[in-house]
Amino acid sequence: MNKLYYSSVFFRHLSFVIFCLSFVLTIFFKIDFLKHEWILPNNTSHFITEVKDEKYNPNLSFLNSMSKLENFFLNEIEERDLNNLEAIYFADELLRDRFYHKDTVISINDNWFLYVFNFFSKNRNNSLYISSLDPNYILKSDHALCNQQALIFQKLMGTINVDYQSILFSVPRSPVSFGHFASAARIDESWFFIDTNLEPPYQQNDATILPRLLNGDLELFNSLYSEFSVDNLPHGAISSSSLNKNPAFMGNLLQKITYVISNYIWVASLFSFFFFRFLSRKIYKMIES
C-alpha cells in the first residue's frame, strides 16, 4: 500500500510539472507578436520553389475543404457526363486552377510541438515535417506543393473508385537534384501520368507517358520538364509506390499526434494531477486507518 501511495504522489507531482511546462509553452507559442524566428527552418521548402507560367484561378478558393472539393468534383462529373478517363483529366485541370505553387506549412500557433520536434531533427533547416499533409488543412490555403497537390488528387480518385499511385522523382542534377512528387491513375490496364503541380505539357489520354518515364526515357523527361533538363537519367530516378495507399500516412500521423500534444496535453495533465491527488489522499486515509 505504501508503494502505491508513493507512486500516486510521484505521478501527481509529475502531472503538475507537465501541466506547468505545457501550459506556459502553449501560451508562449500562441502569442502572435512573437515571431519565433529561432525555431523556423532556414529553407521553407524541400521541393522546387518556383513554377513559371502556372495556372491559378482565385475564384476556386471556396473549395476550402475536402468535402466541398469532392462534392464539386462529383457534381461536375455528373453535369458534364464525364467517364472516368475524362474525370481524371478534369481533376488534373481543377487542381492546376485551384492552387499555385508554394508550400502550405502548418502554423506554429496550430502545432508548436511539431516545430520543437522539427528543431531537434536532422531536417531542422527544411519544411519536411512541418509541411502539411492534411488535405483539409491544405485546402484552407490557395497554394500547395507537389506532394500536397498529389495527396488531394489521389483523394479525388478514391471518390470515383479509380486506382492511383504515387510517382517519385529523385533525379541527380547540378547544382540541386530534381526532387518531385506526382501521381498516376489507372483505367482498365493503362496508367495515366498526372502532374497538377509543375503542369508539364503532356498529351491527355496518353498511356505511354508513365511507362516511358519509369523506363528512363531521357527525351520525354526533358520535354516535360525542360527547365530541369539533364544529360542522364539513372535507373530508378523515377519510381512508383503506394498503390491505393496514402503515401504520407506516417507523416500525417506524426502531425496529428503533435497537434494533440500542442493543444491538449496541458488539459490532460491537469486532469491527471487532480486524479492522482485524489488517489493519493484516498490511499493515505486507508493507510492511516
Image: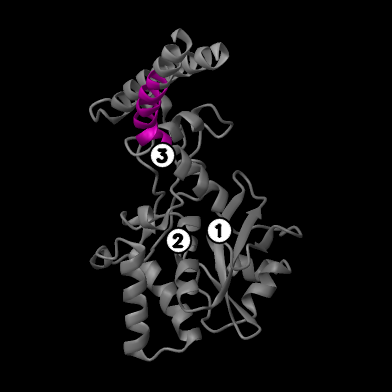
> What is the number of callouts on the image?
3
User: Please, which residue is most extreme toward the bottom here?
Assistant: 81
Between 12 and 222, the residue placed more toward the observer is: 12
The relative height of residue 80 versus residue 265 in the rendered view (above or below) is below
Secondary element under disc 1, as helix, strand or loop, is strand
Between 165 and 170, the residue placed more toward the observer is: 165
Label 1: which residue?
181
Tell me if 189 is positioned left or right of 269 in this view. Answer: right
Label 2: which residue?
149
Q: Closer to us: mark 2 or mark 3? A: 3
Secondary element under disc 3, as helix, strand or loop, is helix
Q: Please report the residue visible at 67 percent of the width from the left and 50 percent of the height from the top.
A: 172
> Looking at the image, what colour scheme do you see?
one colour
Tell me if 188 is positioned left or right of 234 in this view. Answer: left
For marks 2 and 3, give the CA distance: 25 Å
Quadrant housing the N terminus = top right
Q: Please report the residue visible at 60 percent of the width from the left and 43 percent of the height from the top.
A: 175
Which range is magenta? 260-278
User: Please, which residue is most extreme toward the front here?
Assistant: 289
Secondary element under disc 2, as helix, strand or loop, is helix
**Magenta segment, prevailing SS (helix, strand or loop):** helix
For marks 1 and 2, give the CA distance: 9 Å
Residue 74, quarter of picture: bottom left
For marks 1 and 3, give the CA distance: 28 Å
Q: Earlier in the sequence, mark 1 or mark 2?
A: 2
Q: Would you say residue 225 is visible in this rendering?
A: no
The relative height of residue 172 versus residue 16 in the rendered view (above or below) is below
Q: Is residue 84 magenta?
A: no
